[in-house]
Image (tube, helix red, strand yellow):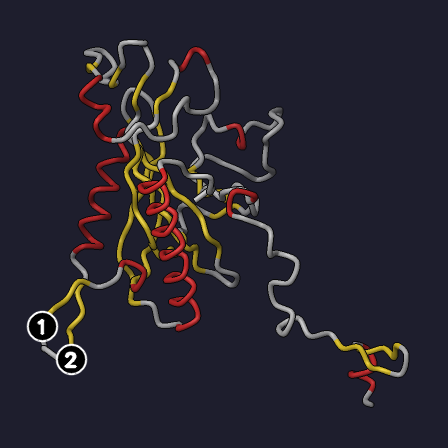
Amino acid sequence: MTQETSDVATKQGGAVATLDFVQDSGMGLENIDKGDLALPFLKLLQSGSDETKKKHAKYVEGAEAGMFYNTVTKKLYNGEKGIEVIPVFYKMTYPEWAPFERKEGRPISNDRGPSVMAETTQNKNSNKDVLKNGNEIIKTANHFVIINGDRPEKALMTMKSTQLKVSRGWNSLMEDQFEIDPKTNKSVPAPVFSRVYKLNSVENSGSFTWHGYNISMLRKVDNAGLYQMARDFHNSLKKAQHKVETQGEDKSNY
């Protein structure tokens, strides 16, 4: 036995125990459902974000407005330099929120569905969609992505208010990607997870200053392992949505 082998092997009762993480892949995770996991959000930090305030409990060292932040890995990304993402799934939701001054921190309902808009009236001063009970419906575009890097990360990007226009533009860009079917020589829609997009933050000014998104298509995915990861992520999200539609309840974080 070489020195290298002896470093990762020990004799137990005459047998040699080796480290084989690949063969034992997934062991111990059998009973962990997506509902037992923290959903990673890819946040675009603003000047008012808790992560940028040094005295706040959620402060993240080095965090500045305009940066991207993964809420689970706690990793910061330079918004000006930008990051690469692969979109895998999209869904528009209609969460119900209490008025801002109540500061409840979470929606009363995660998704009331598009039909709830018929129950709202638009506030002329704020342009908010308000229910009779005073709560607001805030249309939210949900883009599930894989952050491309040395260690790819799954994340959810949410866009609302002024960023819905950016979301629509991104959807149009994704819908405009095609492949040629070699059997028919005709163009067919490309899967959304077959393209890598560049995500940058840009500063916007008006009555106040905020950071928004700038999204551009970079290239086709050229890594088979990364493509399979994106495809599997897409299928798991599609399966979760089907469960919601058939059972009316989603116990999954996705």
Q: Is residue 125 above or below residue 166?
A: above
| Frontmost residue, 187 versus 240 | 240
Q: Is residue 198 left or right of residue 177?
A: right
Q: Find residue 17 and report its horizontal and vertical position in percent.
A: 80, 77
Q: Find residue 195 and report its horizontal and vertical position in percent.
A: 29, 62
Circle number at residue 220: none
Residue that mark 2 sits on? 182
Q: Is residue 223 left or right of residue 191?
A: right
| Frontmost residue, 197 versus 18 | 18
The Cα–Cα distance between marks 1 and 2, rounded to whole angstroms, is 8 Å
Circle 1: element type: strand
Circle 2: element type: loop
Residue flagged by tag 2: what amino acid is it? Pro
* Quarter of the image where the N terminus is located: bottom right
Residue that mark 1 sits on? 186
Q: Toward which corner of the image does residue 214 lie, by quadrant?
A: top left
Residue sitting farthest toward the right: 13
* Quarter of the image where the C terminus is located: top left
Residue flagged by tag 1: what amino acid is it? Lys
Residue sitting farthest toward the front: 247
Seen at 87% across and 79% down, the residue is 11
Seen at 30% across and 38% down, the residue is 141
Seen at 48% across and 59% down, the residue is 152
Q: Find residue 93 and report its horizontal and vertical position in percent.
A: 30, 34
